[in-house]
Amino acid sequence: MMSLLAATGTAEATSDWLAALAALVERVDGYVWGLPLILAVFVTGILITLIVRLQHLRNLGRAFRYMLFTEKGGYGEVSAFGALCTALAATIGIGNIVGVATAVGTGGPGALFWMMIAAFFGMGTKYAEGLLAVKYREISPDGRVLGGPFHYIEKGLGPRWKALAVAFAVFGAIASIMGTGTLTQIHGITSAVQRFFDPQFDPLDMTTGVRLFGATYSTSAVIAGALVSISAALVLIGGVRRIAALSTLVVPVMAVTYVGICLLAILGNVTRLPGAIRLIVLSAFDPAAMTGGAIGTVFLAVQKGISRGIFSNEAGLGTAPIAAAAAKTNEPARQGLVCMMGTFVTIVICVMTGLVIVITGAWEPSLGLKGADITIEAFDRGLSFLPASRFIASLFLMLSLVFFAFTTILGWNYYAERCIEYIVGMKRRGIVRFFRFLYILAVSVGPYLTVTVVWGVADIFNGLMAFPNLIALVLLSPVVWRETRDYLKRHPKGTD
């Protein structure tokens, strides 16, 4: 009896300890992703946009052209389009589908308006990141390229700032392997597959599913987890060139397909479009009045819109310039224009998702839906003119989540390896390969872990990456302007 009481007491103590840890992580996460970071990213975007005098936006046509055509004689590991797709592979993910639904569901339709505002200024941030990544990148004797915030912090600001560069690299590596690129993505994939193929699965029913590690899992989720792990390993072993090759194939196809389905849902309900746009704009400034009091304050709409916008396009976090540095180009400003197209593409996907949600009314609190269920309901209603619309909506969402999350796994591995390479040096390839093995291992065991606390920790480090990067962007903004001005003088007509 005493042993039973002791065991019970130990279990309760463990439970209390985990609950306290979870509460602490949630509190810290709230501080990191609170108003200071949101304001820092937003203000940095405004500052850079003003400093470059909107030249990046005035040359949007060039950016489209540069995105598709690699610079002649440019040096690097992958094409400019390949570098962009590698960045998009990590950027276009669950946040562009579920994140938008969460933002609109909690902040109201007006949150979508503020997401677009965040993206507008985020394009300036991404432009500066891509420009600085190429300007300060390092090329090893064997032709490999290493660049990103850690390099433009150390080389642009000087050796005295190296600690800040190392901090960015450490935060990036931890965030990647502890959740951002591994656990959250594989869980998103297996959950989407299970929701589609085995929606009635009960983990407490030991007569069904697969028994692993003392628990029961859906057969479809186990198979999906294994296939994703094997596929990721086969791609990642090939390095950046194989990641870029797959990304240039998958990312454009999935992005165009997703936008196409969204347009189909919008056109099928086109008579509601003017009212939806009006609701989005007006509720951005008075959400309570426009939603009958169902949604709270303007601050909530702004907070959810801007924070989700930052999370979805990653402008200011410092991830995209790591991929941009590998582009075949000799012109920093040219790659800056290509890099900013990543924000343009992600906001198009977010706006399409948001419009479908608002037009169909799937966001309304009275429905009691959250996250992915809001998106499924939105596409079910939006495609109701098609037979078996619920099945089509569920299938479409599952495939989108699977492909988006899989490419995110690939993109974040590239980011993490470059962070590790900066920390240990480009010659210590054995350490990088060992990290790659750990990364793949994290993906493979991810479906079987309940790691809410770890996700929170990863989210914290993901946010912490932004602070060193934002400091560098502000301090190096005069360099961004000089490079921009010089480039436009040498290529006034954009014929390069």
Image (spheres, helix red, strand yellow):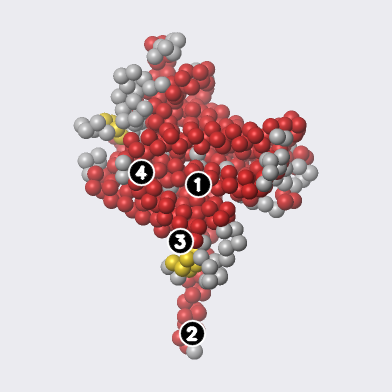
Amino acid type, mark 2: Leu
At which x and y percent is residue 217?
50, 63
Q: CA distance from mark 3 to mark 1?
A: 17 Å
Q: Quadrant of residue 154?
A: top left
| Residue plotted at (47% across, 66% down) | 210
Please indicate whether residue 351 sits to the left or right of residue 154 in the image.
Answer: right
List x then y, in percent, for residue 11.
49, 75
Mark 3 and mark 2: span between their CA atoms? 28 Å
- What kind of residue is marked 3? Tyr
> Considering only order in the chain, which callout, 2 or 1, is on the residue closer to the N terminus?
2
The secondary element bearing badge 4 is classed as: helix
Q: Which mark is residue 432?
A: none
Q: Is residue 175 visible?
A: no
Residue at image mark 4: 235
Q: CA distance from mark 1 to mark 4?
A: 16 Å
Residue pointed to by mark 2: 4
The mark that comes first in sequence, 3 or 1, is 1
Please, which residue is most extreme toward the bottom here? 1
Residues under numbered marks 2 and 4 in contact, where contact means CB atoms less than 8 Å apart:
no
Q: How far is mark 4 from mark 3, CA to CA? A: 23 Å
- Where is mark 3, residue-wise? 448
Structural crowding at the residue carrying mark 4, measured as other residues with C-alpha within 10 Å and reported as few (<14), some (14–19) or many (≥20): some
Q: Which residue is mark 1?
A: 402
Rendered image quadrant of residue 256: top right
- Residue at image coords 40%, 24%: 335
Q: Earlier in the sequence, mark 4 or mark 3?
A: 4
